[in-house]
């Protein structure tokens, strides 16, 4: 399945195609009132820890070290991605940050982790549901000849 996860600055105006708008920063953006942002949620749990964020912004950590540590933080609590995964499954998900350059923030790493988690879950659940009833015919388990307890009959073909 394909998912649309956009990255934007919180200071950009909301657009009709944004879908679920989720602020994924630990700190509230300066000068912004919640009512003006058209947020679906402010979800801090999926943002980097304060120590990790500070170290990266102060140049103590390069991008590679930051990405590994951020992934480890998320892997320590894999359920942290579940709310974001639900929104992505409902349609477009727009991840928001106060960073000047969303592409140079934690959001691209978060999007990658989300897409991988969604792909893994789709693969595990076998998200290959037939689209229409005739497609189900070849998936119905036919009762064995010696299985007298089965009283179900296959659905009619259309």
Image (spheres, grey):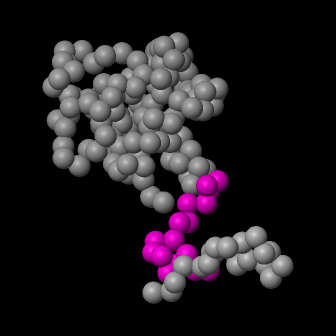
Q: Quadrant of residue 30?
A: top left
Q: Residue at x 61, y 27 (%)?
A: 77
- The answer to whether residue 59 shows anywhere in this view is no
User: In the figure, is residue 130 to the left or right of 29?
Assistant: right
Residue 149 position within the rendered picture, expressed as x and y whole percent measured from the top left:
76, 70
**Number of marks in the image?**
0
- Locate the C terminus and report the quarter of the image it occupies: bottom left
Residue 126 position within the rendered picture, expressed as x and y whole percent measured from the top left:
61, 60
Residue 39 lies, with reference to residue 54, above or below; the image says: below
Query: As rendered, which of 101 and 37 lies closer to the eye?
Result: 37
* The stretch drawn in magenta includes residue 131: yes
Q: Residue at x 47, y 42 (%)?
A: 85
User: In the figure, is residue 87 to the left or right of 114?
Assistant: left
Query: As rendered, which of 33 and 150 lies closer to the eye?
Result: 150
- The answer to whether residue 152 shows anywhere in this view is yes
Outermost residue to the right: 146
Query: As rendered, which of 120 and 152 lies closer to the eye?
Result: 152
Q: Quadrant of residue 11?
A: top left
Q: Residue at x 48, y 27 (%)?
A: 46
Q: Residue at x 53, y 66 (%)?
A: 129
Query: As rendered, which of 24 and 63 lies closer to the eye?
Result: 24
Magenta part of the chain: 123-138
Residue 138 position within the rendered picture, expressed as x and y whole percent measured from the top left:
62, 80
Residue 90 position within the rendered picture, expressed as x and y whole percent measured from the top left:
37, 49
* The stretch drawn in magenta includes residue 85: no
């Amino acid at each position: 399945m394909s998912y649309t996860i956009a990255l934007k600055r919180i200071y950009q105006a909301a657009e009709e195609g944004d879908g679920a708008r989720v602020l994924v920063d630990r700190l509230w953006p300066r000068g912004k009132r919640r009512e003006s942002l058209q947020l679906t949620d402010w979800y801090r749990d999926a943002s980097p820890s304060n120590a990790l964020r500070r170290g990266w912004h102060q140049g103590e950590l390069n991008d590679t070290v930051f990405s590994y540590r951020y992934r480890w933080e998320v892997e320590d609590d894999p359920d942290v991605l579940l709310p974001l995964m639900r929104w992505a499954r409902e349609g477009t998900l727009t991840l928001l940050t106060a960073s000047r350059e969303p592409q140079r923030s934690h959001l691209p790493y978060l999007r990658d982790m989300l897409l991988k988690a969604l792909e893994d879950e789709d693969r595990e659940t076998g998200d290959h549901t037939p689209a229409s009833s005739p497609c189900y015919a070849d998936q119905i388990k036919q009762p064995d000849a010696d299985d007298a307890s089965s009283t179900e009959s296959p659905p009619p073909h259309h």
